[in-house]
């Protein structure tokens, strides 16, 4: 009997697994640091996506305590090892 069942259909990776594959391990150390304040949840999701494309893990925190309302400002938080790279990624470009 083989150790792996070759007859089983291969499952597609979950969205969480696909996101985790993008994260660079060197950016996953240290204490949380706020690197950006977004005006609304849509902008916060956009910024978090930009950071993830550079391998920088982040999370979105409501400026208000708790879950907060569906609108309003959000903080983009990364770990210390990724703070400088995140700031460089989010800095305005003068091309």
Image (cartoon, rainbow, N blue to C red):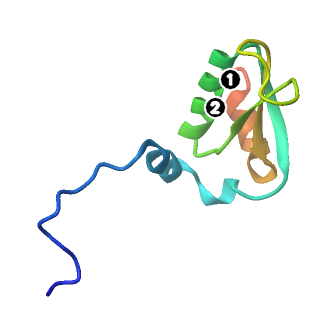
Q: Is mark 1 on a helix, strand or loop?
A: helix
Choose between 34 and 14: the one closer to the eye: 14
Q: Name the residue under label 1.
A: 44
Residue occupying the far right of the picture: 65
Task: Locate residue 72: give its quadrant.
Answer: top right
Report if residue 18 is visible in the image. yes
Counting from the top left corner in percent of width and height, residue 52 is at 58, 39
User: How many numbered marks, from 0 up?
Assistant: 2
**Along the horizontal axis of the image, is 1 left or right of 89?**
left
The residue indicated by pointer 2 is 48
- Where is 34 relative to 45, above or below? below
Quadrant of the snapshot with the N terminus: bottom left
Q: Residue placed at 16% from the left, 84% from the top?
A: 2
In this rendering, the answer to whether 72 lies above or below 25 is above
Q: Where is residue 50 in the image (x, y as percent from the top left)?
A: 59, 30
Q: Report the side of 45 relative to 15 (left or right).
A: right
Q: In which quarter of the image is residue 77?
A: top right
Q: Are marks 1 and 2 in contact (CB under 8 Å)?
A: yes
Residue at x 62%, y 36% (from the top left corner): 51
**Is residue 83 positioned above or below 70 on the image?**
below
Label 2 Cα crowd, 10 Å radius (few <14 / some 14-19 / many 20+): many
Q: State the residue at coordinates (48%, 52%).
A: 21
């Amino acid at each position: 009997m083989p150790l792996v069942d070759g007859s089983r259909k291969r499952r597609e990776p979950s969205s969480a697994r696909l996101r985790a594959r993008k994260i660079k391990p060197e950016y996953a150390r240290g204490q949380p640091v706020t690197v950006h304040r977004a005006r609304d949840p849509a902008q916060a999701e956009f910024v978090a996506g930009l950071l993830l494309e550079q391998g920088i893990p982040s999370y979105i925190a409501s400026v208000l305590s708790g879950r907060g309302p569906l609108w309003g400002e959000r903080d983009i938080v990364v770990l210390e090892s990724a703070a400088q790279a995140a700031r460089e990624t989010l800095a305005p470009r003068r091309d």
